Image: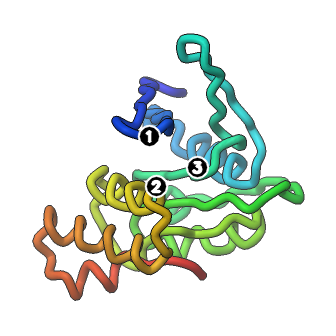
Amino acid sequence: MILERILFKHATKNVYLLADAYDGANIKNCIEDFLLASNGQNPETALHGKTLLKFGGNSNLIAYCGHNGLMEFSVDLKYVQPKSKKEVIILACYSKEYFQKELKANQSEPLVWTTHLMAPETYTLKAAIDGWLNNETNLQIEERAAQAYHKYQKCGIKGARQLITTGF
């Protein structure tokens, strides 16, 4: 299902990002994996040199960027009581509307998600992650992501601010 997996390390911080590119035919599996990981399930580890890295349900921040498959299908997942709430970023069209029920059920916290149609490109993800790494408030991260989206999409900052949101 995963066509490519890339491990990134932050240039100045001891932080890693594992990016999985799923085959589009497996989008339901991708979204289910994201939702379960955001509930603390499906923990993964990877060895990088001598360092054991934790991903999946072991992650501190989990992101989904891509097509909003929940506009076309539903999921039926069993969530557990998480040890701690995970923060999530969802860059997909109308992600707040379509993912809200699942995030409430799996007890994760939306750091950044969207209210309308959008281009789920990585500059928005990078901006949100940078704010998260700098321990910014959710509203500062929301603004940072909106500024990045406006910069590249040239949609107007007002439109970008209406598109990118945080929390329930």
Q: Are marks 1 and 3 in contact (CB under 8 Å)?
A: no
Disc assigned to residue 133: 2
Structural distance between the alpha carbons of marks 2 and 3: 24 Å
Q: Quadrant of residue 4?
A: top left
The answer for how far apart the CA atoms under marks 1 and 3 are is 28 Å
Judged left or right of residue 109, residue 19 is left
Q: Which residue in the protein does label 1 denote?
A: 13
Residue at 43% x, 60% y: name it.
Answer: 134
Q: Nearer the viewer, mark 2 or mark 3?
A: 2
Q: In 3D space, how far apart are the residues under numbered discs 2 and 1 (Cα atoms)?
A: 9 Å
Question: Amino acid under label 1?
Answer: Lys
The amino acid on which the numbered mark 3 sits, given as a three-letter code, is Ile
Which residue of the protein is positioned furthest toward the front in this rendering?
12
The residue drawn where x is 74% and y is 62% is 85
Callout 2 amino acid: Leu
Q: Which residue is mark 3?
A: 31
Badge nearest the viewer, 1 or 3:
1
